[in-house]
Image (tube, helix red, strand yellow):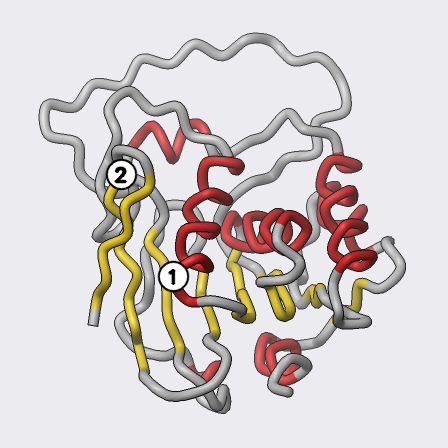
């Protein structure tokens, strides 16, 4: 079942992959991806419903005109999903992991654990000045994944301490003692900074990380 959520001019697709009662597990995909058609094997043991959100410009969500993507825009996508689902555990791949981190810090009362896993997305962690990048993308019929999203979300100029500040908010304001779990093997500077924060835990697999938040 797919529910359409309105986020400004964008219609977001929120997919229910499996029904159930209890706290939902919300999946956030990587850059250029979409919600999987079925519950991933590592999430089979989750006792409640399993849902997945297609970010703006991805999957079955609509494509805005002219780009203007940022991780904060996608965080607002996730915020719209949480407003619909209520308190949830969030699992993100790559770019989705970055968004899971941001929403865990911004909405600690709604995110009952955030898991960051490997996947395509934001390298991030710029610590110095960079040359300007001018993009010109043309498409008569924009279809997901939006080329603007692929171009604008593949890198980030924010320093690592931007990400770690959201981890700090989550660890200080969440009711859970360990609200963020990292199981990504590839760790760009922003994720290394997050792992170094007290209260952030690591896990060898997604299944083990998700199991931390079953109760």
Mark drawn on residue 40? none
Q: Is residue 57 left or right of residue 95?
A: left
Q: CA distance from mark 1 to mark 2?
A: 16 Å
Residue picked out by circle 1: 84
* Residue 83 in the figure: left or right of residue 147: right
Residue lying furthest left: 140
Tag 2: Cα neighbours inside 10 Å, few (<14), some, or many (≥20)? Answer: some
Q: In the structure shown, which secondary structural element does the residue marked by tag 1 occupy?
A: helix
* SS type, badge 2: strand
1 vs 2, front mark: 1
Q: Quick check: 91 above or below 43? A: above
Residue 114: percent from left, percent from top: 62, 64
Residue at 70% from the left image edge and 76% from the top image edge? 204
Q: Position of residue 139 (x, y in %)?
A: 16, 23
Q: How many residues crowd mark 1 within 10 Å: few (<14), some (14–19), many (20+)?
A: few
Please say if 176 is above or below 64: below
Disc 2: which residue: 10
Disc 1 to disc 2: CB gap under 8 Å? no
The residue at 77%/50% (across/down) is 169
Q: Is residue 112 visible?
A: yes
Choose top left, top right, bottom left or bottom right for residue 123: top right
Q: Is residue 8 left or right of residue 23?
A: left
Residue 28 location, quadrant = bottom left
Residue 42 seen anywhere in this rendered image of the structure: no
Between 113 and 115, the one nearer to me in the picture: 113
Quadrant holding the N terminus: bottom left
Image quadrant occupied by the C terminus: bottom right
Q: Is residue 179 left or right of residue 22?
A: right
Query: What residue lies at 86% left-to-right and 54% top-to-bottom?
Result: 197
Total number of numbered discs in the rendering: 2
């Amino acid at each position: 079942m797919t529910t359409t959520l309105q986020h400004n001019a964008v219609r977001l697709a929120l997919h229910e992959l499996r029904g159930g009662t209890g706290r939902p597990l919300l999946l956030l995909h990587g850059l250029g991806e979409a919600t999987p058609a079925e519950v991933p094997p590592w999430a089979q043991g989750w006792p409640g419903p399993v849902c997945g959100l297609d970010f703006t410009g991805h999957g079955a969500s609509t494509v805005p005109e002219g780009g203007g993507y940022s991780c904060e825009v996608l965080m607002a996508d996730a915020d719209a999903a949480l407003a619909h689902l209520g308190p949830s555990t969030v699992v993100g791949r790559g770019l989705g992991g970055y968004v899971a981190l941001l929403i865990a810090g911004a909405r600690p009362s709604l995110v009952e654990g955030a898991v960051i896993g490997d996947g395509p997305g934001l390298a991030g962690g710029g610590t110095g000045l960079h040359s300007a990048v001018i993009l010109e993308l043309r498409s008569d019929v924009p279809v997901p994944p939006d080329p603007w999203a692929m171009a604008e979300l593949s890198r980030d100029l924010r320093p690592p301490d931007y990400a770690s500040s959201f981890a700090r908010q989550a660890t200080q304001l969440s009711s859970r003692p360990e609200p963020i779990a990292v199981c990504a093997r590839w760790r760009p500077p922003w994720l290394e900074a997050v792992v170094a924060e007290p209260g952030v835990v690591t896990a060898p697999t997604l299944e083990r990380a998700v199991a931390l938040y079953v109760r």
